[in-house]
Image (cartoon, grey):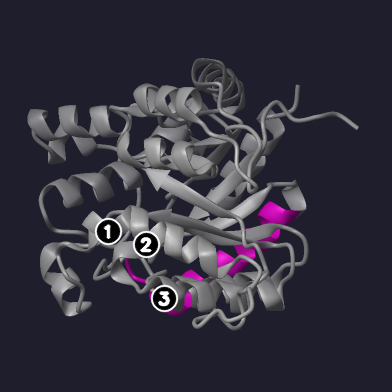
Amino acid sequence: MISPMIPLSVLDLSTINAGSDASQAFRNTVDLARHAEHLGYTRYWLAEHHNMPGIASAATAVVIGHVAGATSRIRVGAGGIMLPNHAPLIIAEQFGTLAAMYPGRIDLALGRAPGTDQNTMRALRRDPRSAEFFPQDVVELLSYFEDSIPGQMIRAVPGAGLHVPVWLLGSSTYSAQLAAQIGVPFAFASHFAPAQLHQALELYRSGFEPSDRLAKPYAMVAVSVIAADTDAEARRLFSSLQQQFIALQRGQPIQLQPPVDDLDSRITAHEKHGIEHTLRYAIVGGPSTVRRKLAELAAETGADEVIVTANIHDHEARKRSYEILAEANCP
């Protein structure tokens, strides 16, 4: 059997396309998850965002259960749950339930950001200072997945003794250092926050302390990959993601728009510079371009795994993008 160049996984936000709705987004998510499983991807993660018109995965644990029930082998999980929005016990119970339903297939990755704006955070009834307690909350959450001990007053039921794999997510160096300290895998969000990628990976690896959960550091890098049969078509498909990020920069989040041929005429030079920086690790192109850039990313970062998001408006083109990437990942 030919080994892949690097393990690949999928990060999906259950994107709501312009002119569509959440129901169709969930149908697309299930279809893509089955496709990714068939193609040999390692895991399929969904992310928590709130009050975003183009993202349907707000109730992340519910969508994870839906995807896990529609697949049979691929690992399914959160990439991630924004822990400051929740009590650790609630998350332990949710993911303990999922792990009991789908043994050996559930991952839980945790983020420190709220996954939304300040007004929505208040609507979630969370204290703005919640992120300050992230390290303590992570340790508390981990404890709920350990074996129960006699006299333990509070247990996650289900959850206790299930040892659900827990990751930390980061877009800066903060969670990299915490992941190293407590000995868990780490994933860096270079698909939208590339600036501190190398510094975070270095701090994670150099500071890693082995734990009962993980003997040596394991680092995942998140990137956008927009693949098509030609470089030109991939660049055109990429304009949907570019429009989405420009709308975020403007403070006006939108549903995922169809691709356009004249993006430069619709944005300012400042906006163009901003998205070029934000999306600088995006891999966009035909098969040979994708293969080369994936190899370069693996060599540059030393990543143990790459998790890929592909915000492509046409669902079949999105599935084709993951096919091309899987083919490009073969030696």
Name the residue: 63% across, 32% down: 216
Circle nearer the viewer, 1 or 3: 1
At 77% from the left and 60% from the top, the residue drawn is: 73
Extent of the magenta region: 17-37
Specify the quadrant that holds the N terminus.
top right
Answer left or right for 245 relative to 24.
Answer: left
Q: Is residue 266 left or right of residue 96?
A: left
* Residue at position x 22%, y 77% in the image: 124
Q: CA distance from mark 2 to mark 3?
A: 20 Å
The mark found on residue 59 in the picture is 3
Q: Secondary structure at mark 1?
A: helix
Proximity of marks 2 and 1: CB atoms separated by less than 8 Å: yes
Tell me, yes or no, whether the highlighted magenta stretch contains residue 30: yes
Q: Which residue is mark 2?
A: 137
- Disc 1 designates what residue? 133
User: Is residue 121 visible to us here?
Assistant: yes
Closest to the observer, 23 or 73: 73
Disc nearer the start of the sequence (1/3) = 3
Circle 3: is it few (<14), some (14-19), or many (20+) Cα within 10 Å?
A: some
Check if residue 31 falls in the magenta segment: yes
Q: Nearer the viewer, residue 292 or 312?
A: 292
Q: Is residue 224 visible to us here? A: no
